[in-house]
Amino acid sequence: MSDQPTFIHRLSDAEVAAFEAAAPDGPLSGVTFAIKDNIDLVGVPTTAADPRRTTPAAASATAVQRLLDAGAVPVGKTNMDQYATGLVGTRSPYGACHSVFSPEHVSGGSSSGSAVAVASGDAEVALATDTAGSGRVPAAFNGLVGLKPSKGLVPTTGTVPACASLDCVTVMTRTVARAREVFTVIAGPDAADPWSRAVPQRPTPARPVIAVPVGDLDLDPPHQVAWEASVARARSQWDVVELDIAAFLDAATLLYSGPWVAERRLAFGEALTDDPEVDPAVREIVAGAPDLSATDVFAAFHRLAALDASSRQAWQVADALLLPVTPTHPTLADVVADPIGVNTRLGRFTNMTNLLDLCAVAFPGPVRGDGLPFGAQLLAPAGGDLALLDLAAAWGGEQVDEAAAEDRVELVVAGAHLAGEPLNADLVARGGVFVRAARMAPDYRMYVVDGPLPRPGVTRLPAAQAGAPSALEVEVWSLPAAALSGFQATIAPPLGLGQVDLDDGTRLLGFLCSADGVDAVRDITTYGGWRAWRASVR
């Protein structure tokens, strides 16, 4: 469980059990999901990160209800940039979230808690929203898949509007396959949503052509290195063409410089005048919306139409556009120093997506040299959702058919390779995907193994020597079988891989410690797991 302010309302064990008892058998039976707190869950207040909103929702949002009907189980409402206005994850009275890869770096927003919930293992899936990039920036900063469907394809009924004509309900997961499963459940028109629409899906091209930008993108140096590696990877998989993306970037600047900011004022402007809980940055952005005449509004629409026409030329030569999700990964301190400027820069490659009626999927790219994740994204015209998921799966080497799934190995990790821990990035880079949280059988002990990077050593003792039952917290990850030998070569003695038993009777490959690494003085079993011990010594 994350020690961050991930949730605004975490459901109690009894509340989760009630949802589990009511869940039907369905395509997502037992799958846990978190919900951004601008999306309704029946019986729970929808705050949009404003503590003055305390009225419980009378019904669940359409997307939430469709997940419930498919057998999924909610675990709570997640933290967010207030009123979904921000890409940083710090504009919340409930506290600022950080990337699970670094306590100094932002989680990204506005769907900050949704990303952290999935990345830290608190939920398998999270619902989020994406008006300007809020479903992709936090996914990128936490090593996740973030699917932003075509506008209107997933109903926004039961969602607090930020910019109603552009808002999208989105999905965050660890794998493309899971994102596809959730998407197929929640997509489809809803008569209660005036922005809802049916969007026919285009087939995945047999030989995809991917566009990449020509020229300098003004990326921070670690991002630039990862981006160049991403382009090289794209060239190795697909036919690649270079394009001038000036029209896309110019469209991105319109989102916060024209009538769409006024639309945010229409959505929740009344809170700006009498609500002391409104975040200062949110107030500055929305209260500062220009007083536009009808002529100004139409001029902005005409400008967008011209940019849209120019950008559509890309789809004459390419099936999808590959971009970084962001130009940088700022620290919390960076945001404090320049809250508006940092946020503006983060939206450079995401703000235009809904304005230009595109769908998008963000996914982990090559890990940066400093160990932070780098997020790439693919964009396509509306109706390309499933095709983009196919391309993202191919990028990550995900096998989506049952026969190919046999070529993966499930691996139990207990320490430095856990989500958010220092070596998790290496596991992800080798194609590792999170499967589930688990516990070991009760006769295992955990010891601290000293070294440049402290690690846990797990050893099984005879029942008579094991002491009180421990049931150590671990995670199960799936790794491509072809990557296993290379991964195993990175494991330094006294640790190695062997068969381990979980408390549900499952036997899987996992980390074990040889006898020469066991020091009874460094026994940390009573903490129940590596994360709990690490938290105790911080």
Image (tube, rainbow, N blue to C red):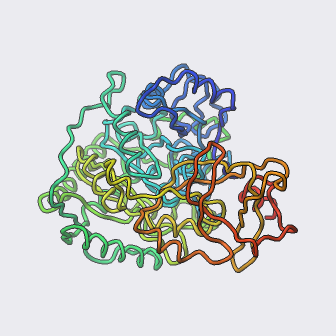
Q: Is residue 18 visible?
A: yes
- The residue positioned farthest toward the left in the image shown: 316
Closer to us: 262 or 9: 9
Residue 328, image x and y in percent? 48, 69
Q: Nearer the viewer, residue 302 or 238?
A: 238
Kindly identify the residue that appears in the image at 62 percent across and 42 percent down: 504
Q: Is residue 314 above or below residue 296?
A: below
The front one of 177 and 153 is 177
User: Residue 493, located in which quarter of the rendered image?
Assistant: bottom right
Which quadrant is home to the C terminus? bottom right
- View extreme (right): residue: 521
- Is residue 81 visible in this depiction of the protein? no
Residue 137 located left or right of residue 154: right
Please tell me which residue is depicted at 65% across the width and 36% down the height of the picture: 9
Residue under the point 31% across and 36% down = 153
Q: Can you say whether 34 is above or below 518 in the image? A: above
Q: Number of callouts in the render?
A: 0
Residue 387, position as x, y percentages in the image: 24, 50
The reply, left or right, for residue 484 in relation to residue 532 is: left
Could you tell me residue 262's position as x and y percent?
42, 42
Q: Position of residue 106 (x, y in %)?
A: 58, 61
Residue pictured at 62% horizontal, 50% vertical: 280
